[in-house]
């Protein structure tokens, strides 16, 4: 069975406080983006995992796809499978590609083995694999709170908008990102902003708390965001805790020449 795990952007990201368990309390709006990896899982005589495409940091046996399989196998009698992940979504970018791969693995295994797990049950398993994994089970805009696993529906629609994603040659780990962030209580909820304010007003009220330390440490990220605004973006921001920056435009533009030697992706959103 083949699936196409998407990525996401974060529309605003408030890091509110550090929790007793070592994680951080956040609030953000997750929005699915149709830049996808390719994931194939088929029955096999033995458990196998291999990947192609872009390089994936870390050991293959620690990949989230395998962790998702092992998590379900601890509760169900799963036979071995062969997992092939073709990686396209850049890593260390704040786009959630690894979490999306894990969620898609759960969804495929649920179907292949007829486990009949509900969406809520799948989200419960997904939340054990990563803070934003549960979001990818539903794959629709959601407000994420807690460490990102507490999800709430949100009325926001970017259908028809043109989006550009730019990833410089910087790999930023989640640990590095949170080490530099300064938690601050949010004065206005992300949900209230994206639901009640026009997109043209987002720039004034939305923020990503990781940007403050990143712009100082990695000026290129600030330069990318500034260029997107200079070229007509209605809203631009860093996604999540990684190095990718996105711009939302009212109409298609070709800015590839502005971001040479960087990963560049663009699309008119259909949803």
Image (cartoon, rainbow, N blue to C red):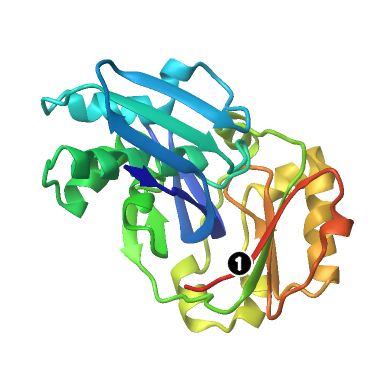
The reply, left or right, for residue 121 in relation to residue 158 is left
Q: Where on the picture, by quarter, is residue 252? A: bottom right
Confirm whether residue 189 shows in the render. Answer: no
- Quarter the N terminus occupies: top left
Tell how many labels.
Answer: 1
**Residue nearest the viewer, comparing 18 with 178:** 178
Q: Is residue 88 above or below residue 144?
A: above
The reply, left or right, for residue 61 in relation to residue 241 is left
Q: Where on the picture, by quarter, is residue 256? A: bottom right
Q: Which residue is painted at 43% across and 44% down in the image? A: 100
Q: Is residue 8 above or below residue 102?
A: below
Where's residue 174, x and y in %? Answer: 56, 34
Q: Where on the picture, by quarter, is residue 42? A: top left
Disc 1 packing (10 Å; few <14; some 14–19; many ≥20):
many
The reply, left or right, for residue 190 in relation to residue 217 is left
Secondary structure under the numbered disc 1 in the rendered image: loop
**Residue nearest the viewer, comparing 182 with 140:** 140
**Residue nearest the viewer, comparing 268 with 182:** 268
Where's residue 64, x and y in %? Answer: 40, 29
Where's residue 224, x and y in %? Answer: 81, 55
Confirm whether residue 179 shows in the render. Answer: yes
Q: Which residue is painted at 62% across and 51% down in the image? A: 209
Q: Which residue is painted at 32% across and 57% down in the image? A: 138
Residue where numbered disc 1 is placed: 206
Q: Is residue 202 above or below residue 115?
A: below
């Amino acid at each position: 069975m083949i699936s196409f795990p998407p990525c996401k952007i974060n529309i605003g990201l408030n890091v509110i406080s550090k929790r007793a368990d070592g994680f951080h309390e956040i609030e953000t709006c997750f929005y699915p983006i149709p830049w996808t990896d390719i994931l194939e899982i088929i029955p096999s005589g033995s458990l196998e995992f291999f990947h192609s495409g872009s390089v994936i940091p870390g050991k293959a046996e620690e990949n989230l796809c395998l962790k998702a399989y092992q998590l379900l196998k601890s509760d169900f009698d799963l036979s071995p499978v062969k997992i092939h992940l073709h990686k396209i979504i850049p890593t260390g970018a704040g786009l959630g590609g690894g979490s999306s791969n894990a969620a898609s693995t759960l969804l495929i295994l649920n179907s292949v083995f007829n486990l009949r797990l509900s969406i809520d049950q799948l989200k419960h398993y997904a939340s054990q694999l990563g803070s934003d994994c549960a979001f990818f089970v539903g794959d629709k805009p959601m407000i994420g709170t807690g460490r990102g696993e507490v999800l709430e529906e949100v009325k926001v629609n970017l259908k028809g908008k043109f989006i550009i994603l730019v990833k410089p040659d910087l790999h930023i780990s989640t640990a590095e990102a949170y080490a530099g962030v300064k938690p601050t209580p949010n004065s206005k909820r992300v949900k209230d902003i994206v639901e009640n304010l026009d997109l043209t007003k987002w720039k004034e009220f939305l923020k990503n708390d990781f940007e403050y330390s990143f712009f100082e440490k990695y000026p290129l990220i600030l330069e990318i965001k500034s260029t997107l605004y200079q070229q007509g973006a209605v809203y631009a921001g860093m996604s999540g805790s990684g190095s990718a920056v996105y711009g939302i435009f009212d109409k298609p533009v070709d800015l590839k020449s502005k971001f040479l030697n960087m990963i560049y992706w663009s699309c008119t959103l259909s949803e």
